[in-house]
């Protein structure tokens, strides 16, 4: 009887309920700890993004200082002649071009409008930075140049720009693939390059589905949930997946977001116009 009273009263009524509460408190603390860890990880990623933005701001301040030195009334000449320096492989022709795209019925497509900064050394790669750097360090052309020499430079540049235009026109006629989708996000571009290196896609996954996934991500890249997804596949846990699992989960995670595919007019023709030119002789 005593044992029964001891077991019923002391253990069942007092020790056991307290033990359950203790376990529940541990589980609650564990959930809070896990939540804080995830929040800390998200904050770290956000901090990296903020620091990157700060670097951009500092770079912008440097540019504003240079522009201030030019004076408020400074007007750049659309066509300018300068001198080459002693650097090797320096650009001799820098141009700013506008590229306008038109649909099958000749209707303009404003969202595809582009401004290109091009030089004969690197083409469009880092074109804007090269244009600013080269323009600032180009001495004035104080001498008289041979008209024949300048015409030769202009003709050579014209032929190079014709080739550039033909390349753009050829791209319009190509069937859209993973390699020629118009991507404007650096993170999406990195993911796209990895997926494009696959010899074949996993079972039950075709090229059209993958292509549509990238189109959706690019169209809605400004959404915070899309940005978080992209970070996972660049710097987070998804980045370490093997290639097949990488593309499978990318498609699945994108599908979960329920992004709507945006239909746009397919460009059928284009027009390239010269905005500014710097010839360094």
Image (spheres, grey):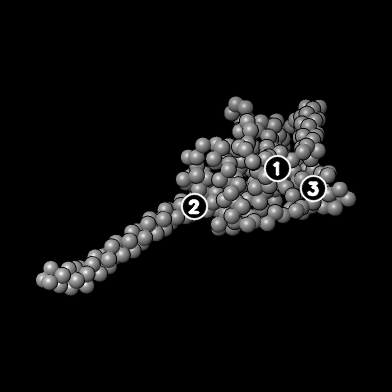
Secondary structure of residue under mark 2: helix
Q: Position of residue 159 (x, y in %)?
A: 80, 30
Secondary structure of residue under mark 1: helix
Q: CA distance from mark 2 to mark 3?
A: 34 Å
Q: Position of residue 123 (x, y in %)?
A: 68, 34
Q: Position of residue 36 (x, y in %)?
A: 37, 59
Q: What residue is rendered at 83% in x and 49% in y?
A: 103
In the displayed structure, does residue 191 sit left or right of residue 280?
left
Q: Nearer the viewer, residue 70 or 170?
A: 170
Secondary structure of residue under mark 3: loop
Looking at the image, is mark 2 or mark 1 earlier in the sequence? 2
Judging by the rendered image, the residue that carries numbered circle 2 is: 49
Q: Which mark is residue 208?
A: 1
Q: In which quadrant of the rendered image does the C terminus lie?
A: top right
Q: In which quadrant of the rendered image does the N terminus lie?
A: bottom left
Q: Position of residue 63 (x, y in %)?
A: 57, 49
Looking at the image, is mark 3 or mark 1 earlier in the sequence? 1
Judging by the rendered image, the residue that carries numbered circle 3 is: 266
Residue 97 location, quadrant: top right
Residues at circles 3 and 1 in contact by the CB criterion of under 8 Å: no
- Point out the residue furthest to the right here: 105
Other-residue count near label 1 (Cα within 10 Å), few / some / many at <14 / 14–19 / ≥20: few
């Amino acid at each position: 009887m005593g044992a029964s009273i001891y077991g019923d009263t002391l253990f069942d009524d007092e020790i056991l309920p307290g033990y359950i509460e203790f376990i529940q408190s541990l589980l609650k603390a564990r959930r809070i700890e896990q939540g804080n860890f995830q929040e800390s990880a998200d904050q770290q990623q956000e901090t990296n993004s903020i620091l990157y933005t700060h670097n951009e701001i500092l770079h912008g301040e440097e540019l504003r200082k240079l522009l201030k030195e030019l004076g408020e009334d400074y007007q750049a000449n659309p066509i300018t002649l300068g001198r080459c320096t002693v650097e090797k492989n320096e650009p001799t022709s820098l141009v700013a071009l506008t590229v306008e795209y038109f649909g099958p019925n000749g209707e303009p497509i404003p969202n595809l409008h582009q401004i290109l900064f091009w030089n004969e050394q690197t083409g469009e790669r880092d074109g804007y930075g090269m244009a600013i750097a080269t323009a600032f360090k180009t001495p004035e052309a104080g001498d008289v140049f041979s008209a024949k020499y300048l015409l030769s430079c202009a003709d050579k540049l014209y032929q190079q720009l014709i080739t550039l235009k033909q390349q753009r026109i050829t791209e319009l006629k190509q069937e859209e693939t993973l390699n020629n989708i118009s991507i404007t996000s650096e993170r999406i571009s990195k993911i796209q390059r990895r997926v494009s290196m696959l010899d074949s896609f996993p079972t039950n996954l075709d090229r059209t589905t993958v292509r549509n996934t990238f189109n959706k991500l690019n169209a809605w890249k400004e959404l915070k949930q899309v940005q978080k997804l992209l970070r996972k596949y660049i710097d987070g846990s998804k980045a370490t997946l093997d290639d097949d699992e990488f593309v499978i989960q990318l498609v699945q995670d994108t599908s979960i977001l329920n992004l709507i595919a945006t239909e746009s007019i397919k460009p059928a023709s284009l027009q390239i116009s010269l905005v500014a030119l710097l010839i360094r002789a």
